[in-house]
Structures are given as structure tokens and as C-alpha cells.
Amino acid sequence: MQASAIAHPNVALIKYWGKRDTGQNLPATGSLSLTLEGLQTRTRVSFDPALQADQVSVNGAADAKAAGGVVRCLDQLRAIAGSRDFARVDSENDFPTGAGLASSASGYAALVRAASAALGIVGHEAELANIARQGSGSAPRSLYDGIVLLENIDDGIACRSVCAPEDWPLSVLVAVTSRAPKSVGSTAGMERSRLTSPCYRGWLETHPADLQTALECVARRDFDRLAKVSEHSCLKMHALAMSSQPALVYWNAATMAAMQVVRDLQASGVPVFFTIDAGPQLKAVCLPEAVPGVKAALAACPGVLELIECTLGRGAREIAQ
Ligand code: PMV
């Protein structure tokens, strides 16, 4: 009745920002992401008939904020397994939590992997993805390897790997510019954009073409075109955020400085592009041969506190206790 799993966060190239059903936590659009080996969540779940309620700790401290979503996921897994036992959940991140590095994605992916293994659930992959997305819309992507597509289907989402890590070994350098938790989380932020940004309609109208283009680029390993459409999706998402009322500005001065570093590298022919989620960290995606140069340039950028080197990684998986 106990199991452990590890999962990596993911970063979207074609972003998700806005929900089509807030109560069900269903995204308005699909998305395309990279699973990031180099950052890791490790979660242990123990079901215990003696417990009176589920207990959730994140990085060694009880976490009441995470508990609601975790209990919802556990309830659905218990229903599949026919179990009524409560669980103790202990989750540790080896990177800043809640700071725009997708700790909720890796957290929920590790949770459903560990909890389903502890309950002896075999198969049910599509259900696991739909359970994970109720905790965090981007979490199903962390269940899968390499480059991952999340699509809307009638009553939920479907998620799958479209390129294994070894088939296109991209590198990602995460430039950490602040370790503080973000002031407006992505759920509240994207709801604000849906309700108040004049750009929201245009976002929905143009998103399917961006996703299609990016999928073609992955199939052809066309880095330059993937760079263009990914930066476009990122900047469009931040245009939505910035044009919300009240405005959501997730960047700081160092985010902008790091973006300029990437643009200067591009101008000198280096295969690199940037993407930024709902936080101030910049992720530089590059071909492996560009890593040393990109690393040196970002390390010299004022305000960059730390660089974390990632590669494309595997989806969430059970590990020995
Ligand atoms: O899954 P959430 O609720 O943390 O939202 C993720 C939102 C972005 O990271 C900004 C975009 C994305 O597609 O990952």
C-alpha cells in the first residue's frame, strides 16, 4: 500500500492560458511541452487504514494549500481501486516551489504515479492523465517522455509523447531570476485574462495554427521554425497576461535582460530561443552544441541568480522506495 515516484516539471512551447471549464479544470486550448530532466519532484504515498484523513506535506512541511487538490486526485484513484483508506503524501522538490518552474505539474504527475502504484492500479493511463489535470492543467504532460502534446477531447484531455528524448536531444537552460513564490498563481491569472483581456479572443482563434506549426517543426526537427512559433506563443501568452485588468506582469528586469541575451545570441547565429511561464524565470531552449556558449552568456547576465541545465527527460515513473 505504499509507493514512490519521481516526475520532472515541463515547460510549454505552445502555451496553455485559459480554461474552457473552470470547475472541471479543463484547458481552453491544447499545448506542447518539453519534459525537463534536471529538475525533479520525488513523492511517496502510503495508504494506511489507521489514518482518519489524508495528510500532505511538501518539502517537509504540512501544506494545506496543496491538500485540496491532492485529496481530489486521491479520491478518484481510490474509486478506481475500490479502496477507502486515507494516505500520507510526502513530496520533495529539488528546485524552487511555486516560482514559475512548474512544481505543480511535476507534483501532480508524481502523485498520480505513486498513488496508483500504491493502490495496485494497472493501465488506466487516459484516466490518470485526466485525474492529474484536475490538480494542475499542465500536470498530464509531465507523465510523458520528451516532447509532449496535450489535446482537448470531448469530455477531457488526451496526452501523449510526440518525440522521445533520444530522437531530438534538445537542451534547456533555466535562468532563475527570483526564488520568491509568484504573487498571482496561474489558475487565478488565466481566469483574469479570460474575463478581462481584450486579446483573449485572438488567442483562442490563433492558437490551433500555432500548435499545428509546432507539431510539424517537431516532426521535421526544424529548430529555427520551432524557435519562431514558440517565442510567438510565449509572448502572446504574456500579452494576454499584461493586458488583463489588473495587469499581470510576471517578468522582472533580469527576465528582460536574459531575453535580450538570447536575442543577441540568435542574431549571431546561435540555435537558441526563449520561453517564459507564469513567473520571472527564463528558459533558453537550444541544440546541445550551443549549451556552453548560451550558458556563459546567461551566467554573465545581471540578475541571473542561478542556471539549471536540463535535457529532455522521461515521464513520471515509479521508483524503488
Ligand atoms: O498547469 P498550470 O495551472 O500551472 O498552468 C500552466 C500555465 C503555464 O505554465 C503558464 C503555461 C503552460 O502551458 O504550461
Image: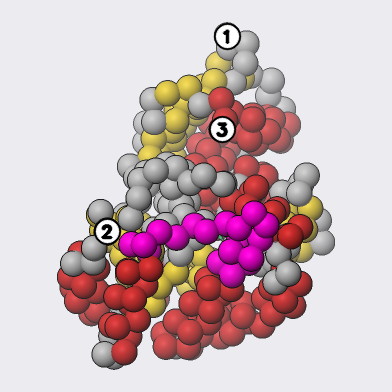
How far apart, in angstroms, are the residues tagged by discs 3 and 2? 30 Å
Ranked by sequence position, the earlier of labels 3 and 2 is: 3
Q: Amino acid at mark 3?
A: Ala
Ranked by sequence position, the earlier of labels 1 and 3 is: 1
Ranked by sequence position, the earlier of labels 2 and 1 is: 1
- The answer to whether one can see residue 11 in this image is no
Residue tagged 2 = 303
Helix or strand or loop: what does disc 2 sit on? loop
**Residue 122 in picture, x, y percent from top left:** 60, 42
- The answer to whether one can see residue 211 in this image is yes
Q: Which of the numbered marks, if any, corresponds to residue 50?
A: 1
For disc 3, the neighbor class at 10 Å (few under 14, some 14 to 19, many from 20) is some
Q: Is 238 a magenta residue?
A: yes
Helix or strand or loop: what does disc 3 sit on? helix
Numbered disc in front, either 2 or 1: 2
Which stretch appears magenta? 237-255
Q: Residue at x 53, y 73 (%)?
A: 235
User: Where's the C terminus, which quadrant?
Assistant: top left
Q: Is residue 269 left or right of residue 53?
A: left
- Find ligand 1 in the image and state its quadrant: bottom right
Q: Quadrant of residue 239?
A: bottom right
For disc 1, the neighbor class at 10 Å (few under 14, some 14 to 19, many from 20) is few
Q: Which of the numbered marks, if any, corresponds to residue 66?
A: 3
Q: Residue at x 38, y 68 (%)?
A: 256
Q: Is mark 1 within 8 Å of ligand 1?
A: no
Helix or strand or loop: what does disc 1 sit on? loop
Q: Residue at x 42, y 23 (%)?
A: 61
Q: Amino acid at mark 1?
A: Ala
State whether residue 222 is above or below residue 254: below
**Residue 44 in picture, x, y percent from top left:** 44, 31
